Image: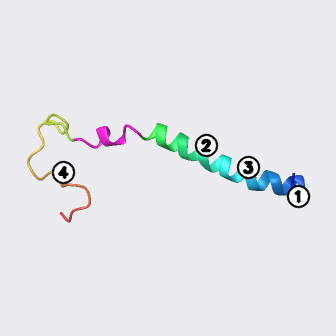
Amino acid sequence: MFGLPMATILIIVGIPLLWIAYTLIFFFSTRGWSREDVEHPDDFGDATPGAHPAAGGAS
Protein backbone atom coordinates (compact mmCIF):
# COMPACT_ATOMS: atom_id res chain seq x y z
CA MET A 1 0.00 0.00 0.00
CA PHE A 2 1.50 3.32 -1.14
CA GLY A 3 4.88 1.61 -1.51
CA LEU A 4 5.39 1.31 2.27
CA PRO A 5 6.65 -1.85 3.98
CA MET A 6 3.99 -4.02 5.61
CA ALA A 7 5.43 -3.37 9.09
CA THR A 8 4.92 0.37 8.62
CA ILE A 9 1.30 -0.13 7.53
CA LEU A 10 0.65 -2.34 10.56
CA ILE A 11 2.11 0.29 12.89
CA ILE A 12 0.20 3.17 11.28
CA VAL A 13 -3.11 1.29 11.35
CA GLY A 14 -2.60 -1.00 14.34
CA ILE A 15 -1.74 1.56 17.03
CA PRO A 16 -4.86 3.70 16.46
CA LEU A 17 -7.05 0.57 16.36
CA LEU A 18 -5.58 -0.64 19.66
CA TRP A 19 -6.09 2.84 21.14
CA ILE A 20 -9.75 2.87 20.07
CA ALA A 21 -10.29 -0.64 21.46
CA TYR A 22 -8.66 0.32 24.78
CA THR A 23 -10.79 3.47 25.02
CA LEU A 24 -14.02 1.57 24.35
CA ILE A 25 -13.16 -1.13 26.88
CA PHE A 26 -12.30 1.51 29.49
CA PHE A 27 -15.48 3.47 28.75
CA PHE A 28 -17.80 0.47 29.06
CA SER A 29 -16.06 -0.99 32.11
CA THR A 30 -16.14 2.29 34.09
CA ARG A 31 -19.54 3.75 33.22
CA GLY A 32 -20.96 2.77 36.64
CA TRP A 33 -18.28 4.47 38.74
CA SER A 34 -20.38 7.55 39.49
CA ARG A 35 -23.07 5.36 41.07
CA GLU A 36 -20.47 3.65 43.26
CA ASP A 37 -19.32 7.00 44.69
CA VAL A 38 -22.77 8.02 45.93
CA GLU A 39 -23.04 7.75 49.71
CA HIS A 40 -26.20 6.18 51.03
CA PRO A 41 -27.46 6.91 54.57
CA ASP A 42 -26.90 3.33 55.72
CA ASP A 43 -23.42 2.91 54.19
CA PHE A 44 -21.55 3.36 57.47
CA GLY A 45 -24.02 1.79 59.88
CA ASP A 46 -23.82 3.45 63.31
CA ALA A 47 -20.78 5.61 62.55
CA THR A 48 -20.66 8.94 64.29
CA PRO A 49 -20.67 12.13 62.22
CA GLY A 50 -17.19 13.00 61.01
CA ALA A 51 -15.92 9.44 61.36
CA HIS A 52 -15.55 9.19 57.59
CA PRO A 53 -14.32 12.54 56.20
CA ALA A 54 -14.99 13.40 52.60
CA ALA A 55 -12.43 12.15 50.11
CA GLY A 56 -9.64 14.61 49.41
CA GLY A 57 -10.30 16.77 52.42
CA ALA A 58 -8.05 17.32 55.39
CA SER A 59 -9.27 15.59 58.52
Check disc 2 and give the amino acid type: Ala
Nearer to us: label 2 or label 1: 1
Spatial CA span between label 2 and label 1? 25 Å
Give the residue furthest to the bottom.
58
Q: Earlier in the sequence, mark 4 or mark 1?
A: 1
Check disc 3 and give the amino acid type: Gly
- Image quadrant containing the C terminus: bottom left
* Mark sitting on residue 52: 4
Check disc 4 and give the amino acid type: His
Q: Which residue is mark 2?
A: 21
Q: Determine the secondary structure under disc 2.
A: helix
Nearer to us: label 4 or label 1: 1
Spatial CA span between label 2 and label 3? 10 Å
Q: Residues within 10 Å of mark 4 (few under 14, many from 20)?
A: few
Q: Earlier in the sequence, mark 2 or mark 3?
A: 3
Q: Which residue is mark 1?
A: 4
Image-based side of 47 in relation to 13, left or right: left
At 18% across and 51% down in the image, what residue appears?
52
Q: Which residue is mark 3?
A: 14
Asked if labels 1 and 2 touch by Cβ distance under 8 angstroms, the answer is no
Spatial CA span between label 4 and label 2? 38 Å
Q: Determine the secondary structure under disc 3.
A: helix
Give residue 37's position: percent from left, percent from top. Answer: 28, 43
Boundaries of the magenta span: 31-38
